[in-house]
Image (cartoon, rainbow, N blue to C red):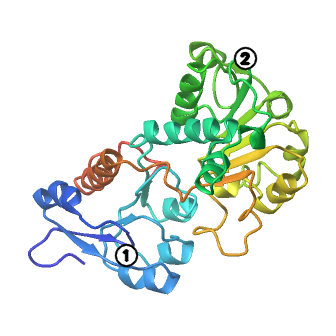
Amino acid sequence: MASDSHRFRVVVTDYDYVSFDEERTVLDPIGAELVLEHARAEDELIAVGRGADALLVQYGRITARVIDALDGCRAIVRYGVGVDQVNIPAATRRGIWVCNVPDYGTDEVSDHAVTLLLASARKLVPMANSVQAGHWDVNEFKPIGRLRGRTLGVIGLGRIGSLVAHKAQAFGLRVIASDPHRSTDYFAERDVESVVLDRLLAESDFVSVNAPLTDETRHLIGERALGLMKPSAILVNTARGGLVDGAALARALREGQIAGAALDVTEQEPIPSGDPLLGLVNCVLTPHAAWYSEEASRALKTMAAEEVARILQGQPPRCPVNQVA
């Protein structure tokens, strides 16, 4: 419940930010109190969420049980794009808007995806490590193929996938994509050929995963999909870890079923010690960093707070992922 001196109570359920200047710049003028918490467990989230008019969520899982304990909450806004950690049907039943910020870091994520593609294609990480270890021999890394003329398959041609395609085309890559939610004209405008997923996997030298994580897309890249890929293919994932079956991917990499993988996201984050993907020389891993730049971080925090402010003032949200009557 808001205090006597504030109209609204906005709870940040969990965070790793060092400053909330952006949020306060947006929320102070509407009389919103910003409450900072470090709640991840379900019972902790229930405790901090009681009396909140809105939640700002970074990593916490907002389950149906958490949502059912929210009295008077009007908005759950995710710091980021993915909202798979929020039980959207439960929120909708309770009349709570669920929103994300889908466009704060599209350049950063698409840049990171293309960087991972290039680094893997050129074997940059093992090559640099070899030189640091005192070796100077390009023959260790042969063969390396020419990039121009090869095929990139993009799974999910949304904001980020479209930018990945555009940037890859500048390197002379032919781009094909699979996205059942996009029209023929949409593909044509991007000079990208629309194909079914199986064909994309079979034809692509590089596969970039840029789809949302849903019940239908979980483990979209599993044993069967990996079996369709070329032995020389490289898989890039900057979307959600759950889109790829990590155990199946590790087996495929160990057995040479595909040539390599470059992942910014994993099924468990942080990736646990002993994960089969660790220690594989043909797997490049980065710590869910694709979204980050100083500019993107400031934009994300500002835009998330603006979404809260809109809803609390009775305005429609800019980026809802559900519909509330």
Q: Amino acid at mark 2?
A: Gly
Q: CA distance from mark 1 to mark 2?
A: 57 Å
Q: Residue at x 75, y 32 (%)?
A: 144
Q: Residue at x 57, y 35 (%)?
A: 114
Q: How many marks?
A: 2
- Left or right: 211 as drawn, with respect to 17: right
Q: Position of residue 259 (x, y in %)?
A: 81, 43
* In the depicted structure, whether residue 323 falls above or below residue 275: above
Please name whichever residue, 268 or 53, is drawn nearer the observer in this view of the structure: 268
Which mark lies nearer to you, 1 or 2? 2
Q: Position of residue 146 (x, y in %)?
A: 72, 23
Choose the circle earlier in sequence order: 1 or 2: 1
Pointer 1 residue: 71
Q: Position of residue 203 (x, y in %)?
A: 83, 27
Element type where label 2 sits in the image: loop
* In the depicted structure, whether residue 9 falls above or below residue 80: below
* In the depicted structure, whether residue 90 falls above or below residue 273: above
Q: Residue at x 22, y 53 (%)?
A: 313
Quadrant (top left, top right, bottom left, bottom right) of the N terminus: bottom left
- Left or right: 48 as drawn, with respect to 31: right
Q: Amino acid at mark 1?
A: Asp
Q: Residue at x 84, y 58 (%)?
A: 248
Element type where label 1 sits in the image: loop
Decide if residue 136 is in sight here: yes
Image quadrant in which you'd find residue 11: bottom left
Image quadrant in which you'd find residue 286: bottom right
- Left or right: 18 as drawn, with respect to 3: right
- Left or right: 112 as drawn, with respect to 205: left
Q: Dot 1: within a 10 Å radius of its alpha carbon, few (fewer than 14), some, or many (20 or more) residues?
A: some
Pointer 2 residue: 149
Please name whichever residue, 125 or 266, is drawn nearer the observer in this view of the structure: 125
